[in-house]
Image: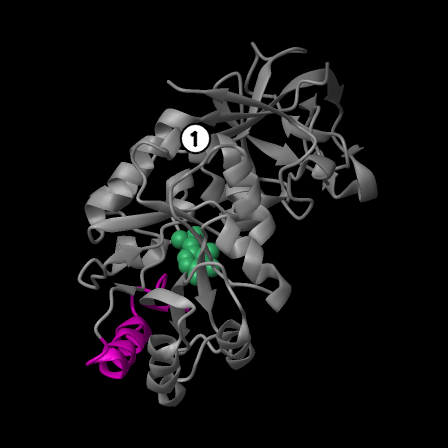
Amino acid sequence: MRPARALINLQALRHNYQLARQLCADKALAVVKADAYGHGAVACAHALHDMADGFAVSCLEEAVELRAAGISLPIVLLEGFFAAQELPQIVKHNLWCVIHAQWQLDALEQAVLAQPLHIWLKMDSGMHRVGFFPHEYAAAWQRLQASTNVAAVVLMTHFSRADELDSIYTQEQFELFTQTTAGLSAPISVSNSPAVLAWPQIRSDWSRPGIILYGSQPVAMSDTAAQRLQPVMTLQSKIIAVREVPAGEAVGYGAQFVASAPVRVGIVAIGYADGYPRHAPTGTPVAVAGCRTQLLGRVSMDMLAVDLTDIAHADVGSEVELWGETISIDEVAACAGTISYELLCNVKRVVYEYSTN
Ligand SMILES: *Cc1c(COP(=O)(O)O)cnc(C)c1O
């Protein structure tokens, strides 16, 4: 069997959730959209079921998968519904529903529902993606109050720059949200992972941590809380070939790496078809048999090359970690010009193995 694997440490996930919850307000939705950022939503939700206050996903289909797997905690649909026809399903599965646009509000008012819904009303406080503008917000809230299809309302907004420690934009967004919601008596929800880590003074009733549950740091912080996050996924494979490449010879497609001195090259059974980023250049860190070394040349679809020159004990069969405990996914993401979120969501084809210790 091909040795490419994603090891998922569910104990680390539990640890990170607990840490996120300590850092933020009283309740935290565990964001498990996009198959729990590539970790497996059902397994992750089950692992958190006895401690989480609720879950958040991006759509009805993702929520139904969790309900079918026996997840009974609250689940928020972060983009609500995409067509009014979904509303009966949302009621049936007892889901909490974001309303971010006028057409959704109209559809909700006009629907004939078996039961009223728990609504999260989204404000656009500066991301300018979705949500009601501040000048529309109170009116939207009034309409929800007046609708017999609404059981309860949470007021929410989303930060666009919470990972920028030297920007006051997050505080400005929060201030606008606070001013706009003054007098609307309902719980509030604002913080994503970077806000939970970097803006602890911003409190809300429900925070919405995603990426930190999986152990990646969305903000470069030397501080203690961020250091206590534990990586949940270890992406690994094995060396399947070793060769000595003489000085002047190239390795891989396009001769992107040319040996300036004799180099001992290990070929690893993992590539971009598994979600390893093709844009990771020579020099991107990897660990072989526990020792840090580097990628050489272009990543192929099923294979990539690493430098074994200084790891004499490494050979065919040696274990390779692409990211995890030894190699931070944030470092790999930086080398590849992307973010951990994208790397994690892209993982595919590999065998998933779950552990609880
Ligand atoms: C994805 C998402 C989150 C989680 O973001 P992280 O940066 O992963 O913590 C929170 N809120 C909303 C509305 C989201 O879409």
Residue drawn 45% across and 50% down? Answer: 94
Q: Is residue 157 above or below residue 237?
A: below
Q: Position of residue 149 (x, y in %)?
A: 43, 68
Q: In this figure, which residue is indicated by the disc labeled 1?
A: 46
The reply to whether the residue tagged 1 has its Cβ within 8 angstroms of ligand 1 is no
Q: Quadrant of residue 172?
A: bottom left
Q: Position of residue 76 (x, y in %)?
A: 43, 54
Residue interval drawn in magenta: 155-184
Q: Position of residue 343 (x, y in %)?
A: 57, 44
Which three-letter amino acid code belongs to the residue tagged 1?
A: His
Residue drawn 40% across and 29% down? Answer: 47
How many numbered callouts?
1
Residue drawn 79% across and 32% down? Answer: 249
Q: Quadrant of residue 14?
A: top left
Q: Quadrant of residue 154?
A: bottom left
Look at the image and tell me whether residue 313 can be seen: yes
> Per the image, is 176 magenta?
yes
Check the picture and name the quadrant holding the N terminus.
top right
| Mark 1 closeness class: few <14, some 14–19, many ≥20 residues within 10 Å | some
Nearer the observer, 214 or 273: 214
Nearer the observer, 61 or 38: 61
Residue lying furthest bottom in this view? 135
Coloring applied to the structure: one colour
Q: Is residue 22 above or below residue 110?
A: above
Q: Is residue 212 left or right of residue 203?
A: right
Check the picture and name the quadrant holding the C terminus.
top left
Residue drawn 73% across and 41% down? Answer: 298
Look at the image and tell me whether residue 344 can be seen: no
Q: Quadrant of ligand 1?
A: bottom left
Nearer the observer, 125 or 240: 125
Nearer the observer, 38 or 292: 38
Mark 1: which secondary structure? helix
